Image: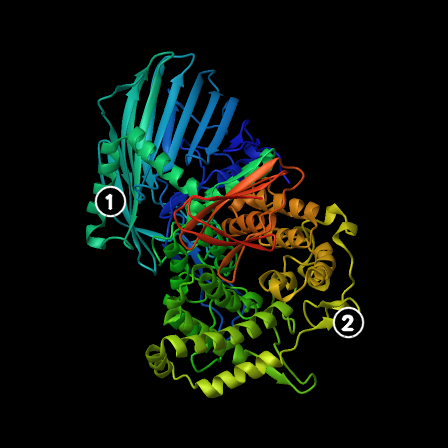
Amino acid sequence: MKDFIIHDNWKVIEDQYHPEWNEISESLMSLGNGRMGGRANFEEKFTGKTLQGNYVAGVYYPDKTRVGWWKNGYPEYFAKVLNGANWIGIDVTIGDEDLDLATCEVLDFHRELDMKEGHLVRRFTAKLPSGKIVEVHAQRFMSIVDSETGAIRYSVKAVNFSDRITIKPYVDFDVMNKDTNYDEKFWDEVEKQITTGEGYITAETRKTLFHVTSGMKFQIFVDGEKQRLSADLEERNKYVSNIVTLDVKEGQTLTVEKFGVNLSSEYTSKSELMNDAKQFLHKAFDKGFDQMLKEHKDAWAVKWETSDVIIEGDAAAQQGIRFNIFQLNQTYTGEDPRLNIGPKGFTGEKYGGSTYWDTEAYCLPFYLATAPEEISKNLLLYRHKHLDRAIENAGKLGFTNGAALYPMVTMNGEECHNEWEITFEEIHRNGAIAFAIYEYIRYTNDFEYLAPHGFEVLLGISRFWAQRVNWSNHLNKYVMLGVTGPNEYENNVDNNYHTNRLAQWTLKYTKEVVDYLKENHAAEYETLKEKWNFDEAKEVEKWLDIVDNMHFPYDETRQVYLQQDNFLNKEIVPTAEMGEENRPINQKWSWDRILRSCYIKQADTLQSLYLFEDEFDTETIKRHFDFYEPITVHESSLSPCIHNILAAKIGNHDKAYEMYLRTARLDLDDYNNDTEDGLHITSMGGTWMGFVMGFGGFRARNNRLVLNPFLPKEWKGYSFKVNFRGAHLKVQATHDNIIIENISDVPCELTVFDKEYTLAGNDTLKL
């Protein structure tokens, strides 16, 4: 755990130069706008520890899977979110010395991410080996108004010298991914153009043949006076730059305003890509830095209006939740159903693919409650668009009759995860997608989505579950063999409770959807039956037999469902007794030792109790929590939020607060020693869940919003906002009262502390 980020309500602040932790700060202060983004790399040359990263949404490469063996059904490649052109670069030379913080004496340093307004600021004073001192101020943002573009204002002040300063803005497409399997480079140059003050490169990805044009246009000022540019033009393979040298007197400030564009062939034809990129960039340049920044700030104000969470009296907790919300909002805007939410967003390369089950399980609730309905719907449509590929994926493993297995990792619907115990066994992901359909409809009442989209996905998943189970004569039950649950510290187990439970639930829910369609969309249902060759009587009979006869491992003594068969053969030793020197075990222990231990990476059985909490009384949830949480190491970013919610449910408020801080500040404090390679974007949806569902007791049940708020003793008060079927509510809690304000014209049905209310539009309920 690190503790170098200053606690602040609206900013992420690094107030000293920490070269050993620079990659962590690069992750934390990453910027994005849904279409592109990048890490908080320095604009000037830097030879110290850094992970250079700029990314364009939807552009990927199918890197050949690197294994020493092959088996039928194994994915042929592992998708890579590609490191794109470095368009932010501005090399600075003072006389004959390069400005490089790795070789300078850093006299002071300040870097901050302004989450309220969505921009990055860096200030430093550095002494070069010659003794010359410069003060630098850099500010940049990725516009969420003009989402193809970004802008940088970079100023250098000559503190104690007069000399020539050489500025070299550039675009460099000669980049590679840190996580490439075979040290390949993935881009080939198509064309480039360069003139004074401007330069562009169009590059093509190998294999996938995406085209991306990245470009720059800049202007230079000295003490606010615009300079006439005279530049030497430099170009080489996948690289263009302008070299501008100016004489600067002591005390003067040289400022570069650099505008960048990144446009892919996903949004315009390849033949028009260069011209369109120029038009976008010229539009941004003509607006100017200040106008672009103003529009960008105004757009962020709108985002915060519907999604902000306010905590009074706890800066660490406040900073944590806003940091998570900020990253979610700048990673995914929901405007393009071809895009999804990458586990690292625009902050790093790890995990390669763009879509895991994390989206459905942890991100959907946030967008349901804080964004327009179509944004959540687009997340579901993304999976529907990939249904044919999910059927192909299942077919590769021997499943038939339209059975669908959605991939663990994907860019285009095809499985591209390269670890067999995940690819073949962690099939609970199918259940997460099915549950997301249910959750979307429960929240929005958009039953029309079921015909045809929801039904088609549910049918494919249900057919998979019906074939994946088998009848055990020994147990006289249906069983599910050879799976991996959410707890990836156990592989190839039998009858994982969470997987079996999701399979059972999905089959039952799909039957309910069939009944709904027969009654409400009879003609379309008949068309769907014919399209999918659905033998309703035969298939539904099998589903209900599985529902009634599914095996769930259970310990009668403890009265808890077991994570899987034989779980109690393990030596059960609480994490409190293992010693901090062993943590994190995924970095300290062999995989063999981890697999034989009782330790749980993340919520597994408890994940089901969270999803299906209405089926369990509070005492039952408490028994399971008290058994599993003490042996959970929380080394998955997806773990603390579920424990936060369940701890709140059972009244363990201290544990709820502890788990909330862990999920909210997971990256800010580098809990798991892995923030340097990127942030845990999808788990940030879980942070919002932990707050709103944990402390707010927020649920959608029976066409009503349910609230059971409590206030941690560490806080003076809090407030959050949610949308529900056209109503927009603000919930405030203090130690004295609960205030629920309907700041819309649409009435809302509420249940608060088990009492029912109808809150009229523009009305307030005070309890």
Of the two numbered discs 1 and 2 in the rendering, the one whose residue sits closer to the viewer: 2
**Image quarter of the N terminus:** top right
Neighbor class of circle 1 (other Cα within 10 Å; few <14, some 14-19, many 20+) is many
Residue found at x 37% / y 30%: 91
Classed neighbour count for the residue bearing mark 2: other residues with Cα under 10 Å, few (<14), some (14–19), many (≥20): few
Q: In this orientation, which residue lies closer to the viewer: 61 or 767?
A: 767
Q: Are marks 1 and 2 in contact (CB under 8 Å)?
A: no
Q: Amino acid at mark 1?
A: Ala
- x and y percentages locating residue 458 in the rendered image: 45, 72
For residue 704, side relative to residue 295 (left or right): right
Residue 319 in the image: above or below residue 512: above
Residue 564 location, x and y as percent? 68, 70
The residue under the point 66% across, 60% down is: 591
Seen at 43% across and 52% down, the residue is 747
Which of 593/15 is in front?
15
Gap between marks 1 and 2 measured at Cα: 66 Å
- Color style of the picture: rainbow
Would residue 88 be visible to someone looking at this image? no
Q: Quadrant of residue 199?
A: top left
Which residue matches tag 1? 277
Q: Residue 155 versus residue 51: which sits nearer the camera? A: 155
Mark 1 lies on a secondary structure that is helix
Q: Position of residue 134 (x, y in %)?
A: 43, 19
Taking the image as shown, residue 761 lies to the left or right of residue 198, namely right
Q: Eyeballing the image, is 653 above or below 407? A: above
**Quarter that holds the C terminus:** top right
Question: Residue 403: which disc?
Answer: none
What amino acid is at disc 2?
Glu
Label tally = 2
* Residue that badge 2 annotates: 556
Residue 323, x across and y down, in percent = 51, 40
User: Label 2's element?
Assistant: loop
